[in-house]
Structures are given as structure tokens and as C-alpha cells.
Image (cartoon, helix red, strand yellow):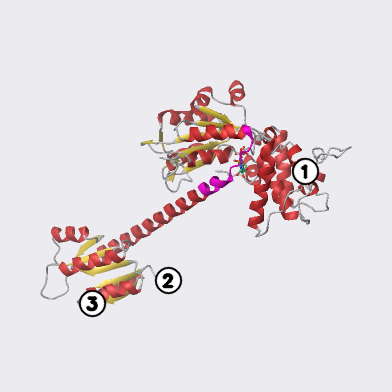
Amino acid sequence: MSTLGKILLVDDDNDILSALKMLLVSEGYQVSLTQTPAAALAAQNRENFDLILMDLNYSLDTTSGEEGLALIEAIRKADDEVPVVVMTGWGTIEVAVSTMQNGANDFIQKPWENDRLLAIINNQLKLASSQQQSKKLTRQNQLLQQEVNDDLGGDIIAHSQAMQQVLAMINQVALSDASVLLTGENGTGKSLFARYIHAHSPRSHAPQISVNMGAVTESLFESEMFGHTKGAFTDAKSTRIGRFELADGGSLFLDEIANTPYSQQGKLLRVLEDREFEKVGGNKTQQVDIRLICATNADLSQAVEQQTFRKDLLYRINTIAIEIPPLRNRREDIVPLARSFLTRTAAKYGKAPLPLSLAAQEALTAYDWPGNIRELHHVMERAQILSQGEEINPQALGLPSTQAPAKPQSQDTSTPATLGQGKDGNLATLASLELEILEQRLSHFNGNAVKAAKSLGLSRSAFYRRLGKSEQ
Ligand SMILES: Nc1ncnc2c1ncn2[C@@H]1O[C@H](COP(=O)(O)OP(=O)(O)OP(=O)(O)O)[C@@H](O)[C@H]1O
């Protein structure tokens, strides 16, 4: 039988224990009865209680409350979370204050009113459970943050001169609080570097909140970014905290910034300029302290010329602009990246990573990688999983043969019919075929996800989802 919670009752008066037991059990609580402080501490040692309801005086001749105060202290030594509610016939303010100072959470005077006692118990249980929940979330957050940081520690590969320069700049910029705009083609590592900047910034103890601006619909933009109050609109059943508020003290990463609906760009600009906003439906102005990191694969100057992006917003976000070069312009990184993806995939399946044949290394280096590192990642994952031999050969890579070296008379193999079909007879999975199509379509439209999605009859958010990208 499920109960509302387990309560430990401590009182030397048997009649009071019986009356309380009857009341609390009828309300759905499970109760344990003890008559002395020693018995209460022994019970607390044996099992976990959700709340302790205790008397302050135990010997008939004392009214000082000292035994009770000592019990509260002993309870607190063993457990600093369990709510403790004190009952006493000596309900003076002084007694109430000293019980609270000793660690009690609330106080009720005997003889008690049932409704009042039940309300106190209920409130204390609710409070304790939300405090626990919040502790859990904080811990989970810390762990997630740690995972991201660990991930960043070993994973960034930058052998090429081009990436060495970029990394040096990023390391320098990370220490400042300046707004950063990361540009570059899809899959070049903009999101990774955004996380890296935050993780190496003085704000790394606070969260980085990401928003994929391409996936936020125009109608929900304000509520998503600034939050809303309860009842602000029909579906607003409770107060919602927006991304700005969540990022307070940390960094806000606006990915695909070029896709911010034009009608909303002014609102975004205002918050970025004033560091102030109001929740939808609310009239209280809230201050926010964030470090802004944006990313885009679009040419924002061109977008300004075409009047799809506000010039003043561009000036606001690009204090420091860093371009992440496409993989074809840093070919020295290709093989080390490929090896690291093989190692990661192999580890995932508890296998040893397969070595890359010399010919495979040449094929990888010669290929132009329109989908950049993301594409390389998928290719290597598939190769590690599907390869039958002792090493990975060029066929297992399944690269479009127009790009593979020493392959004369190649025809146009970029059509879906031949996509992903390994020449060693291995058939690619549906998921990897789909990814390949999505990536090709993206590069066909020069990284414009909106156009690519449209051409495939997908919504922008469905396109992102299938691409395996975060949609926040
Ligand atoms: N230098 C690098 N070293 C190791 N892994 C990398 C590097 N750069 C990118 N990656 C990996 O490549 C993948 C794609 O990177 P990311 O998602 O950051 O690209 P992006 O530029 O943000 O893409 P998009 O424009 O589509 O949002 C990720 O799995 C990322 O971890």
C-alpha cells in the first residue's frame, strides 16, 4: 500500500501518541511511535523517515524543553534534511525561536487543531521533497557539465595549421566575456567550440544554455526565450522559465542565429543590449547576466543586404567573429579525426578499433567532405561497424566514387540509388542512408537547412531531428 510518507512520532504521553496515530493513519500516513528521545534516535538509525513530529518535554517534572532541544540537535547530526516539527504545551515565542535555532522546521502548540497540524505536516513534506528534487537536479547538472567538459578535454583534434590558429584564438577569447560569433559550414564544429569556449571561460561553473534558433517557431519565440507567466495564454498552465533566465550567470548559445525570425530580431536585440526582459504576460522587468555565443553557417553580411537579418543585431553579436574552416581546407586533420571516430565507435561496441589502410587514408584525405566532420564521423562509424576485414579499406568507406582516387569513368553516383552501398557488398542501414541524403541536400543548398528541409518535404525541426542535431 502506498502511503503519503513515513512519520516518526515522539512523545512520552501514550494518549497523545494514540490520538496522533489515529489522525495521521486515517490521512494515509505510515507512523512509528516512540516515547523517549533515546528510542527516537534508535528508530532514526534503523530507518528513514519523511518527517519527525516530536514533543519538547519528556520527564513529567521538566518544562524547560532541554531534552527536546537536545533531541533536535541529535537528529540533525544524523540527518540535516528530514523535516522536524515540534509540539509543546509551552508555546511561548522564546521556545519556538530556540527550537528553530536548534534545527526544527516548524512548531505547533498543544492542544493542536487537527487541520492546522495536517497543513504543517503537508507543507513540510512538500518543501522537503522539492528541496531534494532541486538538489538532485543540481547534481545531475554538475555531472552533465562534467561529461561535456571531459568530452571536450580529449576530443578536440586540431593538427592542421589552420585549426591551430583557430584554437589559439578560441583559447584567448574564452577567458574574456566578449560576444563571440562562430561561422563556418555545417558540421565544422561550431557547437563543439561554443561548448569549449564556455567550459574554458570564467563562467564554466554556471550552465551553458543552447537554443537552435532554426527550430524555435515564430509564435513561441518569446515564451521560449523569455518565459511566460501562468495564464499568459491559453496553454500557459504554469509559469515557464525562458532560456535567458536559465542561462543567467552562464553562457547563452544561439545556434543558427541567421534563422531567427525577422519579426523577433528586434526583441532579441533589446534584451542583448539592455540585459533586461519581461516574461510573456508579466510586467516585472528581470535582469540577466549572460555571455553570448552565436553560430551560423550563413553569410550574415549578405543576409543584412537581403534584409533578412538586422544590421544592429549583427553588430551586437559579432564583437569577435571566428571562422571555423571546412575540413577540405585542413586535410591534415582528416586522418587523426577518422582514427578518433573509429576508436570511439569501437569502444562503444567493446571492440578494438580497426586500422586504416594506406589507401583508405588517401581516399579520406582526397575527399572534399561537404558535410565536414559530422559526415566524416558517420562514415567512420559505419566503416568500423560494417568492415569484415582486418583493416579498413577504401571500399568500406562508401565514399561517392567520383571522389575516390584511381576510379576512372566514374558516373554520377550522388543519386540516392547508390548512396551508402559499400562496394564490398555491405548494405548501409536505412538510418545511415537517410543521413547521407540529408547531408547531401544540406550541402546542395550551401548549408541552408530551411531550403534543404523544404526540398525534402520536411519541417525544419523534423529535418534537424533526423540529422541528429539538438533542437532546443
Ligand atoms: N576538432 C574536432 N575534433 C573532434 N571532433 C570534432 C571537431 N570538430 C567537430 N567535431 C565533431 O563533429 C561533429 C559536428 O560538430 P558540430 O555539431 O559542433 O558542428 P557544427 O558546425 O555546429 O554543425 P552545424 O552547423 O550543423 O550546427 C560533432 O560530433 C563534434 O563533436
Where is residue 378? Give x, y as percent: 69, 47
**Split into 4 quadrants, where in the image is the C terminus?**
top right
Instruction: Return the disc, 3 or 2, that comes first in the chain's sequence.
Output: 2
Residue drawn at x 55%, y 48% is: 151
Q: In the rendered structure, which amino acid carries the disc numbered 2?
A: Ser
Q: Quadrant of ligand 1?
A: top right
Q: Residues within 10 Å of mark 2 (few under 14, many from 20)?
A: few
- Dot 2 falls on a residue whose secondary structure is loop
Taking the view exactly as shown, the residue that stands out farthest to the right is 409
Is ligand 1 less than 8 Å from the beta carbon at label 2?
no
Q: What secondary structure characterizes most of the magenta part?
A: helix
Instruction: Return the disc, 1 or 2, that comes first in the chain's sequence.
Output: 2
Q: Which residue is mark 2?
A: 2
- Dot 1 falls on a residue whose secondary structure is loop
Q: Residues within 10 Å of mark 3 (few under 14, many from 20)?
A: some
Q: Which residue is mark 1?
A: 399
Which mark's residue is nearer the viewer, 1 or 3?
1
* In front of the other: 424 or 239: 424
Q: Residues within 10 Å of mark 1 (few under 14, many from 20)?
A: many
> Which residues are the magenta region?
148-161
**Vertical position of residue 392 compared to residue 441: above or below:** below
Which mark's residue is nearer the viewer, 3 or 2?
3
**Vertical position of residue 22 compared to residue 435: above or below:** below
Residue drawn at x 20%, y 58% is: 101
Checking the image for residue 35, the label placed there is 3
Checking the image for residue 452, the label placed there is none
Q: Quadrant of residue 299?
A: top right
Q: Quadrant of residue 461?
A: top right
Q: Is residue 276 left or right of residue 293?
A: left
